[in-house]
Image: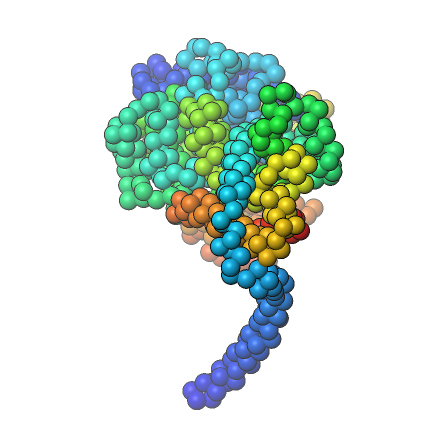
Amino acid sequence: MTTNTAAGTATDLGQAPESGAPVRIQALSRSFGIVRALDGLSLDIAPGELVALLGPSGCGKTTALRIVAGFESADSGSVSVDGKDIAAVPAARRDMGMVFQSYSLFPNMTAQDNVGFGLRMRKLNSASRTKKAGELLEMVGLSAQARQYPHQLSGGQQQRVALARALAIEPRVLLLDEPLSALDAKVRLQLREQIKTLQQRLGTTTLFVTHDQEEALSMADRVGVMREGRLEQIATPSELYSRPASVFVAEFVGTMNRLPGEYAGLDEVSVLGAVVPVAGDRPSGLAGVVDVLVRPEGLTVDEVPSGNGIVTGLTFLGSLTRVSVRLSGDVEVKVDKPSTAAVGLVPGTSVQVSLAGAEPVLVATRT
Amino acid sequence: MAALATAVADAEAPAPQQAAGGRRTFPVWRWVIMLVAAAYFLIPLYSALRFAGFKAFTQVTSYPSFGTAFALSLRLAVIATVLTLVLMVPTTVYVYLRLPRIRRLLEAITILPIVIPPIVLIIGVLRLAPGFLKGTPNLLGLEYVVLAMPFAYRSLDAGLRSFDVKTLVEASNSLGAGWPTTLWRVVIPNLRTAMLSATVLTVALVLGEYTMASLDNFQTFPVWIVNFEQNSGPVSVAASLLALFVTWLLLMLIVTVGSRSSRKRGGAQVTLFSVSTATVGRTVGEPE
């Protein structure tokens, strides 16, 4: 399940900038009391790659990040950077830049001194510290705020200073622990792009932890979906969306409909009057009546007198309109339709919902 | 239009009235409380001033023992404060970050000096103290460190709760700072206010402590005042007032110097009012 095609190509093509180091996480396990936070997590990050760990709270993603940072230790397994095991290296000597979820700037220092802190620890003299800190603050667009204290900065500005501070030490690995979750939506979007642009420009290997799928899908080269301390699937955002490896991933990433269906053969199910192949292996214990997973764009909806459903709501999304339909048997589904074609639909309209194609589908136990 | 304006005026009219009414009734209580509190503190001071008379103040300072007693108290205050901070700051931070489970235990331990009677403490200390400390004021300084522990611990603990120490320490570590540097450059600057209030409380405690000093046979300032009372009432009272004033001045100095930079950075401040009232209770209350 842990495929590393992206990792391979990045190195082969020689795109990896020099500053980025490869990171290999192998069979990492960690328990807190009876809670298994990590259960054999393995992950390879190519030099200069941005990998996001995505998962619900408690899936172990933060624990993984903290072990890489050196703030926690693993019960078993290893983390190596540049081919060297770093278990024995204290956090202070790992050369990892970290941006935290909460505002972690030192309140007693100006923005410039915050950015210069890591350089000071590396014994740079005051003049070169000021110069470097100035460059980094310019990079995040905060030159004018260099002499301000954290409490004088907005939340977004603080996180940008924190990013500049983490990058100032030219880290081998950049660790981002939900750095945007405390910000409001607009700032979050801007900062998302800024982080991505900077990361690509500097080519710093980056591990990014988030519970926000949109954030993960829009920023990462590859996204690892975590569940109960393990990687459920790691793939590029588009692959994750179009070919989810499991029901959990399918439902966690993007919007997914559950439609009642029934096995029509060994590898086929009938759903909405059509028979389609089942993707992947047949899950054990599944037979007869099942739920079939289909995305909103995998369905069509057409106005038909006495169809199989009734429109209950419409959400305008620009070029698309998401139509909510109640099917017989009280099943609610969402169907995407080009807005131009959805004009005639109003709540109460009788419609026919059917499959858009014959793509293989995922099936799950009926809930 | 006119009708609308009237309607708006009508609708708005009751609100200012209510507000004004609120402004009228609430401050009365505030003033009453202020006056009662002020009377409680100022009447004894005024009576003391009347009783002592102005002449007594000049007399006090002419006694050579006044200077020595006061110098001893100051010396003890410095010893106790420095030792308290040096011992308590790293301990509290370490327990807060690394051993959160024993925080309750530490809280219980630090309350002991208040629970155990001074006489018991003294006997214990005298039994355990190494020979070279016995009979020197340094021993008394160490005893004051113990006495100041409850106040220092609580100030520091409250200070640690006021910011995200864990994240700041981790940020500092990830940037390459080891423990001593993190403590010195990150934790302590942000604990400034808490350390300041610990200092103020320790100094106030030492400058007003009588029992330990007198049991240990040291002529600290409070002991000197009590001894003096037997010779001359007015002079002793004048000395108390002087002590109160000097202590207050000293604490004000500590607070002003200590919070100047924290004010610049928008940090919290120790207010003088709370400090000065605490001192009145200690310096005047205990020796008499």
Q: How many numbered marks, from 0 up?
A: 0
The quarter of the picture where the C terminus of chain A appears is top right
Q: Is residue B71 in sight in this rendering? A: yes
* Residue A293 image offset from top left, x and y in percent: 60, 35
Residue closest to the eye, A22 or A162: A162
- Relative to A330, say whether A268 is above or below: above
Residue closest to the eye, B5 or A326: B5
* Residue A120 image offset from top left, x and y in percent: 35, 26
Q: Is residue A214 left or right of residue A160?
A: right
Residue closest to the eye, B109 or A6: B109
* Residue A49 found in image quarter: top left
- Relative to A12, say whether A244 is above or below: below
As drawn, the residue found furthest toward the top would be A84
The structure residue drawn at horizontal position 68% and vertical position 36%, both measured from the top left corner, is B215
Q: Is residue B167 in sight in this rendering? A: no
The structure residue drawn at horizontal position 60% and vertical position 44%, both measured from the top left corner, is B224
The structure residue drawn at horizontal position 28% and vertical position 32%, both measured from the top left corner, is A130
